[in-house]
Image: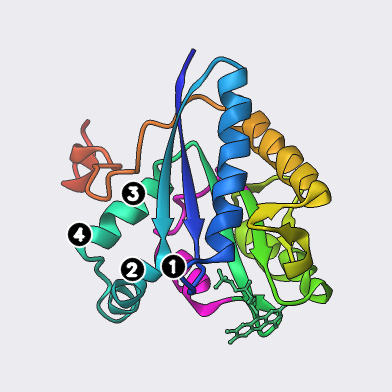
Amino acid sequence: MTRRTLAVVSAGLSQPSSTRLLADQLAAAARDELVRRGHQVELRTVELRDHAHDVVNNMLTGFPSAALREALDAVTGADGIVAVTPIFNASYNGLFKSFFDVVESGSLVDRPVLIAATGGTARHSLALEHALRPMFGYLRAVVVPTAVFAAPEDWSGGTADGALRGRIRRAGAELADQVERRPPSTGPADPFALTTDFAQLLGRRDS
Ligand SMILES: Cc1cc2nc3c(=O)[nH]c(=O)nc-3n(C[C@H](O)[C@H](O)[C@H](O)COP(=O)(O)O)c2cc1C
């Protein structure tokens, strides 16, 4: 048995938020699958609206606040990520993009990611394929094959309807597969870690 962490990133702006609801259900599906396979799972939820001002400040100053640092570490140190955005103007919303713009470059390489979105119309479901998947591809994360889109008609009384429930289960199992294939994360990368030999830093050639 190993201990795994899943970071759940939700960029919904409303309260309550259908994006957060979808994120929670996807995270629960992945967690249940990992638990069924004998792992212990910790979920770390990052509600981006709580960090909106700090994300902008980080873009302007180059430094995260303590709270944003914690959120970034939760994401970069997780074994797997559930990343969910509402669709705005046929793409991810600005908050979702800005958050991933301040994630340290290289920190999501080979990281399993499940992408999902909510929207006002199912006609925009392909934004997952033309916006989210390429962005995580650029970051060299490993995006699972099933991307989940939920339109208003996919919900009944606050829970996913039959077809959406099936997609959530399948995507959760795909994320669990990818997480299980990798050794447990050792946590976020230390930005101050020495990656160059000290003698090399001093310019010595005799070592
Ligand atoms: C500024 C804005 C732009 C939007 N653009 C789209 C859009 O292009 N396509 C779409 O399907 N829904 C669009 N929507 C609807 C939201 O995606 C939808 O209401 C979403 O589920 C809200 O998520 P939340 O409940 O987590 O806030 C837009 C909403 C806003 C506020």
Query: Where is mark 2, residue-wise?
Result: 51
Q: Is 35 on the left-hand or right-hand side of 163?
A: left
Tell me the distance, in whole angstroms, between the alpha carbons under discs 2 and 1. Answer: 9 Å
Of the two numbered discs 2 and 3 in the rendering, the one whose residue sits closer to the viewer: 2
Instruction: Give me the residue at 69% from left, 60% from top.
Output: 133
Tell me the distance, in whole angstroms, between the alpha carbons under discs 4 and 3. Answer: 10 Å
- Where residue 134 appears, x then y in whole percent? 69, 64
Type of the residue with mark 4:
Ala
- Which callout, 2 or 1, points at the residue further toward the start of the chain? 2
Type of the residue with mark 2:
His
- Which callout, 2 or 4, points at the residue further toward the start of the chain? 2
Tell me the distance, in whole angstroms, between the alpha carbons under discs 1 and 4. Answer: 15 Å
Query: Where is mark 4, residue-wise?
Result: 66
- Which callout, 2 or 3, points at the residue further toward the start of the chain? 2
Tell me the distance, in whole angstroms, between the alpha carbons under discs 2 and 3. Answer: 13 Å
Tell me the distance, in whole angstroms, between the alpha carbons under discs 2 and 4. Answer: 11 Å
Secondary structure, mark 3, is helix
